[in-house]
Amino acid sequence: MYLGLDLGTSGVKALLIDDRQKVIGSGHGSLDVSRPHSGWSEQEPAHWIEACEAAIAELKASHPKELAAVKGIGLSGQMHGATLLDASDKVLRPCILWNDTRSHVEAAALDADPRFRKLTGNIVFPGFTAPKLAWVKNNEPAIFARVAKVLLPKDFLRLWLTGEHISEMSDSAGTSWLDVGKRRWSSELLAATSLDEKHMPSLVEGTAKAGALRGELAAKWGIASGIPVAGGAGDNAASACGMGTVGAGHAFVSLGTSGVLFAANASYLPNPESAVHTFCHALPNTWHQMGVILSATDSLNWLSEITGKSAGDLTGELGETLKAPTGVSFLPYLSGERTPHNDSVIRGSFTGLAHESGRAVLTQAVLEGVAFAFRDSLEALKTAGTTLTRVTAIGGGSRSRYWLKAIATALQLPVDIPADGDFGAAFGAARLGLIAATGADPLAVCTAPRTDATIEPDVGLGGAYADAYQRYRALYPAIRAVTA
């Protein structure tokens, strides 16, 4: 058996697979996000451990014998979080999360230093880790002075699991401190934020062993002591391993809290001006590009809270037959946007509202707005040298066939729906745990699932969607002009 642990924003998932990669069982522990000020987003690292304990306890209760047979563990997690530890590994402050935008001034200052884009292949986004440390230095200098180690969220879990300070390439590529082409920390970039390599964990590939399970936890869970913990991956690279999106030309669209259009690459293809992320993949000698939108299902969840109707009820009101855009447009910039705008200040909007604009019209506009945000990412990937011919849909939002039809029509690409199964980040993490424990060929393990159905673009609505997308594109500069 092999265990995948995925530390998400809303919870920790523990997934158990056997040596044929069949999912045996799973457990979950919930998490909340603290937003003490506008633009802030934090979590207590201690809560990650509590959620992980809860997930494994659930798994142990339902599958004790299978859990006892675990021979390898893989980790996945939300990226970019700044977890600050002192010399005794004590947490110094709540972790500043990926969707926190407080460090936009510091991010702009670092991005103005040409070394960052040259070495990382990326814009320095406010959500990345380096500007967060610059913010802490500027605003919490007493805490900054005590920082001995900076860990990404999943690597804080690794410290708890193994006692080791270790990270891997895919997650570390989102810090703005990694030389992404050479797959190593950059002493130059660390020095630009008053840090050095002693503040960083050591680095391995995601498929490599990165510590061993501590005896105390092994005894508690009924697992053998000393089993390997894989390097693992950031959540999107882990999802790619779960989906088999590891070869050039393979791509997926993820409809989660945030939205991702992810493409695997056989070489390093940076183009930071497009606001596309270019990161190391979890597999050696592999990279990936992705367009990122900050509020995908979060946009629908926001509307759900406003209307008092569940997300499923809202999308259910639309049926499954795709409708022509109504003229009501939605910009899904509820917490700023990454691709293609790199704008932490912009906020969302509805335009074109009329007396007859009921709840269903608003829902339709939200789904279309997110679909058009993915189209923005597709256009950005094209300028970065990546052309896609089809994508596979994953994430909670992909349960809505209407939404997938809207995305297929907005992208003008077929969208494949995988056969029933769990192919997300926890599954990818479990695959990495299997590889680290057995030495198996990563490409033989990280295969694609069978396609259950394919959603084709609606040819009849192609023109209406193209017009609506142009309207959507024109709204950003107009709204930006009146955004403080």
Image: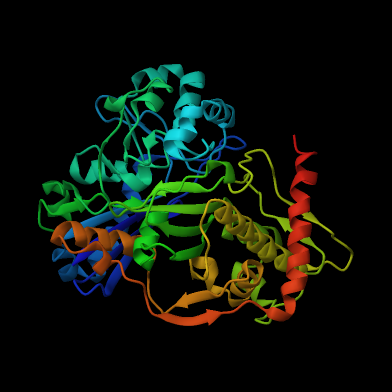
Residue at the image point whose x is 18% and y is 67% from the top: 1
Give percent across and percent down for residue 420: 41, 79
Q: Nearer the viewer, residue 126 or 378?
A: 378
Task: Please give left or right for residue 294 compared with residue 171 in the image.
Answer: right
Above or below residue 326? Residue 329 is above
Give percent across and percent down for residue 319: 67, 80
* Residue 172 showing in the rendered view: yes
Task: Please give left or right for residue 228 compared with residue 400 in the image.
Answer: left
Q: Which of 201 and 360 is in front in this view?
A: 201
Q: Which colour scheme is used?
A: rainbow
Q: Nearer the viewer, residue 153 or 220?
A: 153
Task: Please give left or right for residue 120 compared with residue 299 in the image.
Answer: left
**Quarter assignment of residue 332:** bottom right
**Quarter assignment of residue 92:** top left
Residue at the image point whose x is 19% and y is 44% from the top: 162
Quadrant for the C terminus in the image: top right
* Residue 12 showing in the rendered view: no
Q: Nearer the viewer, residue 452 or 184?
A: 184
Residue furthest to the right in view is 355
Give percent across and percent down for residue 230: 22, 52
Give percent across and percent down for residue 212: 15, 48
**Total tally of numbered discs in the picture:** 0
Task: Please give left or right for residue 218 compared with residue 303 in the image.
Answer: left
Residue at the image point whose x is 18% and y is 70% from the top: 66
Above or below residue 121? Residue 375 is below
